[in-house]
Image (spheres, rainbow, N blue to C red):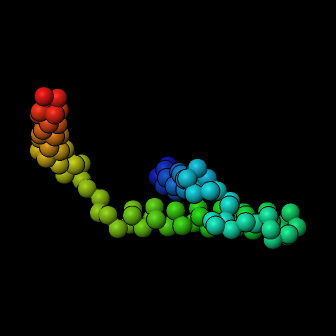
Amino acid sequence: MKLGFYLFAEYINMFISSAVMATLYFGGYDIPFVNEASWGLSPWLMSLISFSVFMIKISLFLFVFLWIRWTIPRFRYDQLMNLGWKKLIPLALLNMIISAAVMLWLNK
């Protein structure tokens, strides 16, 4: 039962993240490039259309979340540690050295 709550919480998190992204970055309930005020519909029908648009945007983001989650393979812990210690840390140090050298060279 605990695993079920954990998986359920993960899907709820995806739903809430999709709703926040749709609200903050993609206009929320607003239909893109359309002036809904000129339609002259009743407020009840307009709110139903706006809610449907918001749910469609959330559904699209959920689809993208699930698509990425199901497409990219999961790494084992030892593979992640190997990637981090043997590849990413040397690349970060190299990036820091090159950035410092470029900054010193440009300040002349």
Of residue 18 and residue 73, the one placed in the foreground of this image is 18
| Residue 98 sits above or below residue 36 on the image | above
The residue sitting at 49% across, 67% down in the picture is 63
Of residue 3 and residue 38, the one placed in the foreground of this image is 38
Is residue 76 among the parts visible in the rendering? yes
Is residue 5 among the parts visible in the rendering? no
Residue 71 image-quadrant placement: bottom left
Give coordinates of residue 100: x percent, y percent: 15, 32
The residue sitting at 68% across, 59% down in the picture is 29
Give coordinates of residue 99: x percent, y percent: 17, 36
Of residue 47 and residue 96, the one placed in the foreground of this image is 96
The residue sitting at 49% across, 52% down in the picture is 10
Residue 104 image-quadrant placement: top left
Quadrant where the C terminus sits is top left
Give coordinates of residue 88: x percent, y percent: 17, 44
Query: In the rendered view, does 50 fall on the left or right side of 85?
Result: right
| Residue 100 sits above or below residue 63 on the image | above
| Residue 6 sits above or below residue 40 on the image | above
Give coordinates of residue 97: x percent, y percent: 12, 34
